[in-house]
Amino acid sequence: MRKPSSHSEFELIHRFFASPNLSFPREGIELGIGDDAALVDVPSNKHLAMSMDVLISDIHFPAEADPSLIANRALAVNLSDLAAMGAEPYCFTLGLVLPQNDEAWLADFSGGLEHLAKKYNCPLVGGDTSRGPLSISIQVQGLVDRDRAARRSGAKEGDRIYVSGTLGDGAIALLALGLDSHLGSEFSLTVNEPNAACLQFFEDAYFKPQPQIEFASNAAKLFSSCIDISDGLQGDLQHILDESEVAGNIRLGDIPYSKSAMCCVNPENRLLAALFGGDDYELCFTVAEKDCVELESIADQLGIRVTCVGGITAGEGIEYLDADGSPVGLNPQAFQHFSAQA
Amino acid sequence: MRKPSSHSEFELIHRFFASPNLSFPREGIELGIGDDAALVDVPSNKHLAMSMDVLISDIHFPAEADPSLIANRALAVNLSDLAAMGAEPYCFTLGLVLPQNDEAWLADFSGGLEHLAKKYNCPLVGGDTSRGPLSISIQVQGLVDRDRAARRSGAKEGDRIYVSGTLGDGAIALLALGLDSHLGSEFSLTVNEPNAACLQFFEDAYFKPQPQIEFASNAAKLFSSCIDISDGLQGDLQHILDESEVAGNIRLGDIPYSKSAMCCVNPENRLLAALFGGDDYELCFTVAEKDCVELESIADQLGIRVTCVGGITAGEGIEYLDADGSPVGLNPQAFQHFSAQA
């Protein structure tokens, strides 16, 4: 048992994390880094939303990647959980485990947190550091109007199912970046190597997912339910259906794909990526039919692509439909295989 | 890159963590485990206190230890940070990284969290699980009256310095349990093997530190500053002195030791353990002279041992005093060595 060297830990925290660029003041943050606990206020008309994600080296990110990209991804995937509640980012804490005290790595890593922290006025207020196998625990705190939180449990028969952005890019990015995917050996690119534009697109999709904070904070009042797509549309929509005790259908032809996904992957694998890939950090949400015009108008004003991909019905489970509205039998083997894994 | 199997993760969370014994309802917890984020209320006269500690296998606990003891230790050291702010525990989140899906281990581990969670009405409200090298990230949330938080920065010249409980037991426990200590090869027991009573005492000191929640919530109104002793009295008192911009003196003869520490370790090593050992999770706090009678009376009523070990003075640094009040030159070599490490 080696007690961590807390003197050097203390210095390290102060140099790289208790910096004005990262642990900056914000209204309501009474006390940040430097005491036994951070102290924050929560306005009486708000709930505090809290979500923790742990990212493990070589599982959730390649250990050798640019530390600033790792940092961006780690904070972005956490912020995406706040977006899925319709919450506004408030502050975050960081538990960083590092194999050694690598100052260059730390400088890049803390620099990589700054962009999203500043963009969303979400300062670092505390946490812990330790020696050990590289991992990153982040807990984000957000504020959401007490009656406006977008839960998974509110979808109702007749609601429409929407997704933001395009799906499958997170999973296809693994292929483009030469990383392993859990989708099996047939999940592959149709090109030997993506062109420079596609490569950049997928690198950004993987390391710089855009949490849909702004869209959600404007539109969540119209969501009857919401989840962020971290495990693939099939699994994440199923969480909404389970919590809401309803069924849903998805029109496969309406699933939105990026130009790069169209360019680099065949239709079967695009579908696999969208349904079972995950790592998209887009939102899947349901909206009552009467609210859909307003919803699409909000998205339009913000320049956010939203696509109605299906609807909520009675019963349980997901039915997949073709362009005519006829049920599609997805390859049952693949379906079962990835359903069990996803 | 292996995407974690989130289906089994989901099941695992529900079986072991979303249980009525651990994620129980509590007033103010609007939404716990099972959505993209937990939602909690914070009364308008309270601050929310937040503290995160990351515990790494074989650094902060022996990997092979009883999982329920590991769990107890992990939650206790986090709750100790809330005690150091004078905050009442509210809820906690858990980021658990496990090498494999070991159901017996998980059952014991989640069972080990239940005792303190129930004792302090502090339910588990969210978190994350992943495969990887064993580690435990816990963030505790607490509530503290807005004007009552016990910070490190309020110590004033003339205040008395107190500690709760006895010091050094956490460090001596490492020796008693056969674990490595960072205090060097001369830091050893005076007995070949502690007797059964001492062994049990040290096992409890290590795995079941008692966070001073109840005492702090009653007495923190009288603290001018407070910190929990996780790194040893020298380093932790120094944090108070730094933040408060004052100096302090410690009467070495007044440092309180347990019977087991007196039984198993010589005076030099007891002092080393108290000043530089850490892991005691007792409180070091300062109290204005006029409040000391009331403070000691509160401690007395709760059956908590508190000991005045010195006082706050002008200047900087810590002066050590013998029984006559004369400055003591601690062995400068040991002092420097452990000051640099502590």
Image (cartoon, coloured by chain):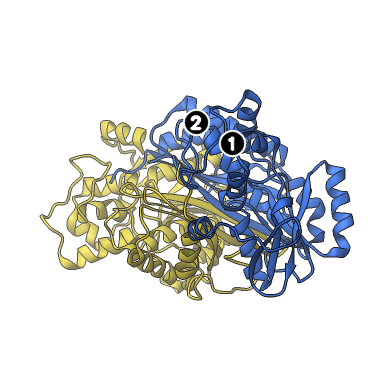
Chain colours: A yellow, B blue
Q: Quadrant of residue A199?
A: bottom left
Under tag 1, what secondary structure? helix
Percent across and percent down for residue B303 are 82, 41
Specify whether B105 is left or right of A221: left
Q: Is residue A140 left or right of residue B116?
A: left
Image position, residue A218 (x, y; %): 54, 67
| Quadrant of image for the N terminus of chain A | top left
Q: Badge 2: few (under 14), some or many (20 or more) residues near its Cα, within 10 Å?
A: few
Q: Which residue is mark 1?
A: B207
Residue type highlighted by circle 1: Phe
Q: Position of residue B141 (x, y in %)?
A: 64, 52
The residue depicted at 72 percent of the width and 45 percent of the height is B165
Q: Which residue is mark 2?
A: B65
* Helix, strand or loop status at disc 2: loop
Q: Quadrant of the C terminus of chain A?
A: top left
- Which chain does the residue under circle 2 lie in? B
**How many discs mark residues in the rendered view?**
2
Q: Residues within 10 Å of mark 1 (few under 14, many from 20)?
A: many
- Above or below A203: residue B72: above
Residue nearest the observer in this picture, B119 or B57: B57
Q: Please name the amino acid that badge 2 sits on.
A: Ala
